[in-house]
Image (cartoon, rainbow, N blue to C red):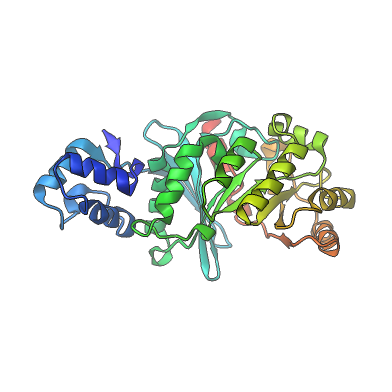
Amino acid sequence: MKDIKDLSLEELKKVLSAWQEKPFHAQQIFSWIYKKGILDFSSMSDLSAGLREKLSENLYICGLELIKKLESRDGTEKFLFALNDGNLIEAVVIPQEARITACLSTQAGCRFRCQFCASGLLGLKRNLSCGEIIGQLLYLKSNAKNKRITHIVFMGTGEPLDNYDNILKAIRIINSQEAFGIGARRITLSTCGVIPGIKRLAEENLQVELSISLHTADNKLRSRLMPVNKIYPLKELIAVCREYIKKTDRQITFEYVLIKGVNSDLQSADNLVKILADLKLCKVNLIPSNFIKECGVEPPNKLEALLFKDYLIKHGLHTTLRKSRGEDIEAACGQLRFSYEKK
């Protein structure tokens, strides 16, 4: 049996046609699942009893088991879920004035082992299916204030472009008006710099936001912080980003986690200015690191972070300094999951 959330609308229509059922029932089923949050075929009252029986006999709606929920003083909520095979993943809801952002995972674990991220400490267990990715959003939406999620960021556990086909399928369902109807420009896909995936994404004709985890403009330091740089070096990554901007006419956001004593000094800021100087559509999002004991990581002080930001702005880079969220609830990627799996 297959999780129905692994099917696009067109794929579901083909399944129904093979059963000699009218294809328009696919829209009704999508509405029940994605708009009304109904995860039981027997409750889909505008479908015939015969169709509901066929659905139950041939498909299922995979749910997630909540293991733990934590709520921060700033309103951020973190969820630890168990999948059907016992693997654990995390998701986060971040309320910000008029927007409510869901941060979703794409893998159980991560193969890339960035030194400042807890997600890869135990390696990669497996990719998530499209249905498991969407299942997180369904759960978060059903538990959100006013049942409302406005923005999606794929910045949870795992590397999205290392699970390319499933993440693109999930994005298209999330964007679909028959499902969640969340605009592509409100969906952000983050990558540590998987060049083949960036090239594929440039050909998709999707207006999703692309975010690159950069974290330093020094190639040797980046290889130490982010082993992926040994496969896809900084010079090649920036060249591909330049081509992506030219091909899509879309801005790229460069994420830069500020780590005390590692990459938060003004020389690091100057290196960043130089490497991004000729990119026409880009911005830098500075993020003071969370305290991650397992990785030996801590943030710089507030003054150092502000000086770094001001240096970039002075030299013409569109720059924001993001306030860390959920510091009191292990909200950094992989922290809560790691604390459970290491037991």
- Classify the position of the N terminus by image quarter: top left
- The one nearer the camera, 293 or 239, is 239
The image quarter in which residue 207 lies: bottom right
x, y percent for residue 164: 51, 38
The residue that appears at 54% across and 58% down in the rendered structure is 76
Horizontal placement of 115 versus 314: left or right? left
Horizontal placement of 37 versus 243: left or right? left
The image quarter in which residue 319 lies: bottom right
The image quarter in which residue 14 lies: top left
- The one nearer the camera, 229 or 76, is 229
The residue that appears at 40% across and 50% down in the rendered structure is 173
Is the residue 234 above or below the residue 151 in the image? above
- The one nearer the camera, 149 or 50, is 50
x, y percent for residue 178: 33, 58
x, y percent for residue 59: 24, 39
Is the residue 212 above or below the residue 307 in the image? above
Count the numbered circles shown. 0
- The one nearer the camera, 309 or 143, is 309
